[in-house]
Amino acid sequence: MLRILTAAEMREADRATIEDRQVPGLVLMENAASAVTRKLLELVNDIGREKALVLCGKGNNGGDGLAVARQLLLLCPRLDLRTVLLAEPDTLPPDAQANWKMLAAQDHAARVAATPGAWNALLPDVADCSVVVDAILGTGLRGPARGTAARVIADVNRGFRDAKVIAVDMPSGLGSDSGELLGESMRADCTVTFTAPKASQVLAPACESVGELTVARIGTADSLLQALPGPRLLLCEADDARDFAAPRDRSGHKGSYGHVLAIGGSRSKPGAILMAGTSALRAGCGLVTVVTAAGACDAIVAATPELMLEPASELADGTLGPESFEARLYAGKTVAALGPGLGNSGPNRALARRVYETCPLPLVVDADGLAALQERPIKSRAAPTVLTPHPGEMARLIGSDTAFVQRNRVQTAREFAASTGTYLVLKGNRTLVADPEGDVIVNPTGTPGMATAGSGDILTGIVAAFLAQYPDRPVLRTAAAAVYLHGLAGQLARDEYGEQGMLATDIGRHLADAAKELRA
């Protein structure tokens, strides 16, 4: 997992690197510029044929840009390069000023455009540039970009539409500490950030301005990041999920990989619990038993005969009630999943509360199971509990509204998990997974095509399957790996069917392909 840093945490890491570990700031700047230059040479096939513009602001981010310009001159002597400093040279901090002087020593005539008028005068000469390096504003921005910087950002966004834009540490105009947009920001094709990702680079909607994100190590030791106080915000990567898709032991058998007990469904709506159970099998669980209304069993077994069924007594409407479930069904099971297709009547909710309060197993709760928990305070259980609400369900759980949840996703997830002793999967663009200790993991996979009926039921099955297969691993990381695989399968389904045409069952069908991709 990558630690995601706030601007203050990044400043402390830089301070400790320079002052405590005695790594000169100029060395960090040179390493940062080298990382950007390498990425730029990857991004642009034959950069010697391009016309490039390096835009440098007044801080150390601008110093990084000046160092990039200097390295490009050394590595690509045929490059048609324009460098523009959006500040007076004598206002630069020491390390940036040193790079300004070193650039001049290479006979490169950088331009100065410290005012909007000066930028307007230069614009005709640079408007046809095909590559733009954005080193205007870095991680310290606290409000919307203003003055010359704001004007340049707007002009590049509107007038350089065919240019490749690579951002140095942060797309200019983007804040560091949340997914909130402060104002207009540079729309980058690629961002090379240093040491660790920043919150805005991985949280929506701000992350949409980042493009491809590359995290470059420039000289800060891991131990300094580990020493930063918690709670932590973390980014899940493919390597973190890969451990959950490893090849199996040849001596394993179906009992080696857990047994999920899935509770839900009804006579008229068997699909949700069918999708949850089937996806649990697709995600590697050895056995799945579905407890559902007797009238739903024929449809379920016809679709997935590998599922085992426990037909339960029905209410008049074909749903499950408090008397439909027997405690004996917990015997021999590893994990329970509750809620998909259960129904939201009083008797349905009574059953869900009974299971929540008495289940001795790790429990995953979704959909109608979550609705039953809204009526009374959520108590922690002896076994781990994973709740998987979408933003509307989350709002109802905390007695708020969806807009509040979406504005405060990290805070909401962190506080809810801590106050209830549960593990929370807050679904949506950049799904969050939070634990009772305050750590929150951000998931980068997924696609808008997953906003379709049944997608959450597929996720419920995957989370339950992973908890069943890996009971000794930390629940937070197990749930995060399940969310990662779910999103990756969604991307594969999108590639085949398109965002508008994909169904939740397409996500389930691509789970095996997603696991194979992780292993590869």
Image (tube, grey):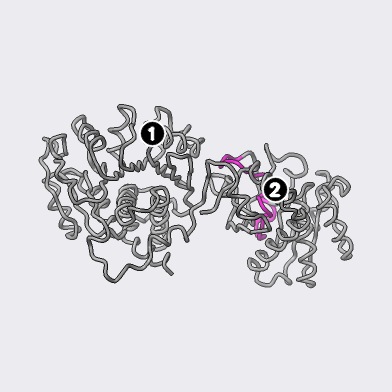
The image quarter containing residue 436 is top left
Q: On the image, which quarter does residue 280 sit in?
A: bottom left
Residue type, mark 1 in image: Thr
> Label 1 neighbourhood size at 10 Å, few (<14), some (14-19), many (20+)?
some
Q: Residue furthest front?
A: 20
Secondary structure character of the magenta stretch overall: loop
| Residue labelled with disc 2 | 16
The secondary element bearing badge 2 is classed as helix
Give residue 125's position: percent from left, percent from top: 81, 58
Where is 73 relative to 303, above or below? below
* Residue 172 highlighted magenta (yes or no): yes
Which-is-in-front pick, marks 1 and 2?
2
Residue 74 higher or lower than 4, as above or below: below
Q: Mark 1 = which residue?
A: 420
Residue 22 percent coordinates (x, y): 75, 53
Point out the stretch of residues depicted in magenta: 157-181
Q: Is residue 2 left or right of residue 331?
A: right
